[in-house]
Image: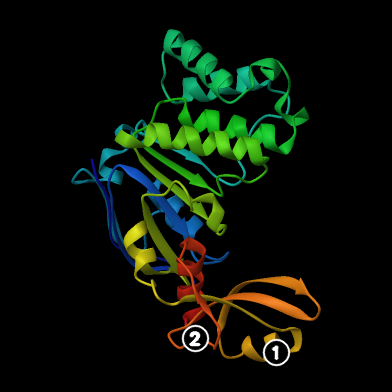
Amino acid sequence: MELKIDKVTKQFKDLKAVKDVDLNFTPGIWGLLGPNGAGKTTLMRMMVGNLRPSRGEIYFDGDTIHSLGGEYLERIGYLPQHFGYDKNQSVEDFLHYIGSLKGIDKATRHKRIADLLEQFNLSDVKSKKIDKLSGGMKRRVGICQAMLNNPDILIVDEPTAGLDIEERRNFRQYLTAISKDKIVILSTHIVSDVEFIANYLILMEDGAIIESGECNTLINSIDGMIFETVVEDEEMKILEQKYCIVNFHNEGDGKVRIRYISKLPLKNSKLMKPDLNDYYLSKVRGAK
């Protein structure tokens, strides 16, 4: 199974939101990571067929998604940052409505909804109106509607928005369990959303793909460039102009422990093992 983005560009008048993107998605979890305004949402809307590319094509197993039409839509699930619902609908009624729109037969729909409500701890509020739910519960309802048709491709924009710590853990665990034979694409500007579960990483900035590949391979490419040391508080302000400081901690007595990226370390620095946050910041800020 393959979802291929072939030289895709999307232009809105004078704004080129997505620029000549080439990507090949295969089963596994893909983290689409980049700052707000990078073009991630526009790219996803083209992947789910809500927008047509200005140039280029998107293929699913060799056929363009627009030639496949409904056949393609039946195989994808999409959770945007904000999903629409009738404020008078209950959770269960909403899911049945979405299931019928997706062409799921009644018996399958009932079982699927019951399983998802249980999976995401919503069974107790299934008769409650969505508009009366907390932000985290609404997000979980959105996850359920995206998974109703047991899609081959799941695309989620800002996956953990509104979820508390326990809900985030459960959602990541769920995605990991289903990702063996599905393409799961998580778009976010928060590194921790994908840090521990993504198999592959795509970095996007200013509408273009700046890096993509297997997570561990990308992280290991900056091995030997991550350091920690303790400096004077006033010295840190100067160092910020010369080094890519990715984290810091106040040690007290006017001292600060800094974690930074460099090919030329400061004196008394300790070499550290790189992580995804280090790699991301090395690319969007630039290591010195």
Earlier sequence position, callout 1 versus callout 2: 1
Q: Residue at x 58, y 34 (%)?
A: 142
Q: Residue at x 68, y 43 (%)?
A: 162
Residue at the outermost front position: 268
The residue to which callout 2 is attached is 265
The residue to which callout 1 is attached is 235
**From what the image shows, is residue 181 above or below residue 148?**
below
Q: Residue at x 62, y 44 (%)?
A: 82
Q: How far from the left and from the top, in percent, is residue 229?
A: 60, 78
Q: Tag 1: residue type?
A: Glu
Residue at the outermost right position: 253
CB under 8 Å between callouts 1 and 2? no
Q: Tag 2: residue type?
A: Pro
Colour convention of the picture? rainbow
Q: Quadrant of residue 11?
A: bottom left
Q: Residues within 10 Å of mark 2 (few under 14, many from 20)?
A: some
Q: Quadrant of residue 254?
A: bottom right
Q: Residues within 10 Å of mark 1 (few under 14, many from 20)?
A: few
Q: Gap between marks 1 and 2, in whole Å?
A: 15 Å
